[in-house]
Amino acid sequence: MTALFPWQQTVWQHIVDRVEQQRMPHAVLLTGVAGLGKKQLAVKMAESLLCLAADKHFNACGVCHSCQIMQAGNHPDHLTIRSEEAGKSIKIDQIRALKEKQSLTPSVAKWKTVVIESADLMTNSAANSLLKLLEEPQNNTILILTTNAVHRLPVTIRSRCQQMHLSTPDYSMTLNWLDSQGVATDADQLRKISSLTLDAPFAIVHALETNEWQSYQQIQQDFDQLIQQQANPVQLASQWQQLDLVKVMHQLLSAVKSRLQQQYLEYAETSVTQHYWHIADCIVNTIKLISSSNNYNKTLLIEDFMVSVMRITHTRSAIH
Ligand SMILES: [Zn+2]
């Protein structure tokens, strides 16, 4: 059955307590940055709720009829809803299928469970349709939504779910876990990748496996060129277009923060530190814009960002 990861313990204990107190909410919203295993945790919750003989720590037994059909992927009391194609929306038809399912009584287990992965990908009409279900909860159905972009979910949906937030683990916990998985890499490189992936363990593993992080090293160089007014924003924007913009912005924010720290340590001129503060503002604004809408124009957003950074540093061509 699905494993529990060390950084998920606190949230899991909370769920166990709620089950013991028979206060399990009808709708749970699992939040946290990408790469913490929220989807696995949602599946684990469903497995345990459906299991006919879960233990006192609310772990599914793995051998009962319900566990067996769950593992085979054809449990009649369980439904997973996710985007049918990477990057595409979750459509209203998919939520309608859930509606039909809701009207049935559980056939094997005590509960019916529904997992909606990356719920922020729902179209407006899909979200409205789900909202109607959340407004009339059924006693025997538990919905588990996951998202790493909670602000993209309508407030009406959020307010009807019990939000459970998965925090990013301490760096030492991440290191121990990576070690236990046999992931070996240079400490310095790991630090860089970790800041790029917001310290999320699965995102670190993914970055290492795909060499994705190398393209982000390029970002660092591009950014330096921008600051020194040596970049062509249109050309650069078309390159950045290929990347995950949220990751890029978080990487730049962490780079700017560490440069600011350095400037303070060196008692740098106020004008230089001010430039960095303004750039940090720009980055935060860009992250806000990305988070608040599904339909932003990526190229335009990147170009705007680059032009703003160049404008900030224009009066002083060589901040470093
Ligand atoms: Zn079982």
Image (cartoon, helix red, strand yellow):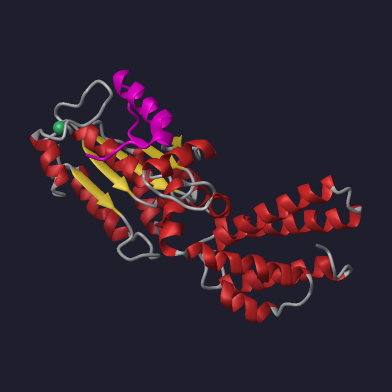
Res 162 seen here: no
Question: Residue at position x 37%, y 30% from top?
Answer: 12
| Residue 259 place in picture, x, y as percent | 75, 53
On whether residue 236 falls in the magenta region, the answer is no
Point out the stretch of residues depicted in magenta.
1-27
User: Farthest residue in the top direction?
Assistant: 21
On whether residue 5 falls in the magenta region, the answer is yes
Name which quarter of the figure residue 23 lies in.
Answer: top left
Quarter of the render that holds ligand 1: top left
User: Farthest residue in the left direction?
Assistant: 65
Instruction: Tell me the quadrant of the picture where the N terminus can be found.
Output: top left
In the shown orientation, is residue 248 left or right of residue 260?
A: left
Establish if 115 lies above or below 225. above
Establish if 128 lies above or below 307. above
Res 213 seen here: yes
Question: Residue at position x 35%, y 48% from top?
Answer: 130
Name which quarter of the figure residue 304 lies in.
Answer: bottom right
Question: Residue at position x 65%, y 60% from top?
Answer: 286
Establish if 216 lies above or below 133. below
| Residue 294 place in picture, x, y as percent | 50, 62
In this view, the residue in front, 87 or 244, is 244
In the shown orientation, is residue 31 left or right of residue 320?
A: left
Question: Residue at position x 14%, y 29% from top?
Answer: 52
Instruction: Tell me the quadrant of the picture where the C terminus can be found.
Output: bottom right
In the shown orientation, is residue 188 left or right of residue 134?
A: right
Establish if 18 lies above or below 67. above
| Residue 30 place in picture, x, y as percent | 41, 40
In the shown orientation, is residue 161 left or right of residue 261?
A: left
In this view, the residue in front, 96 or 70, is 70
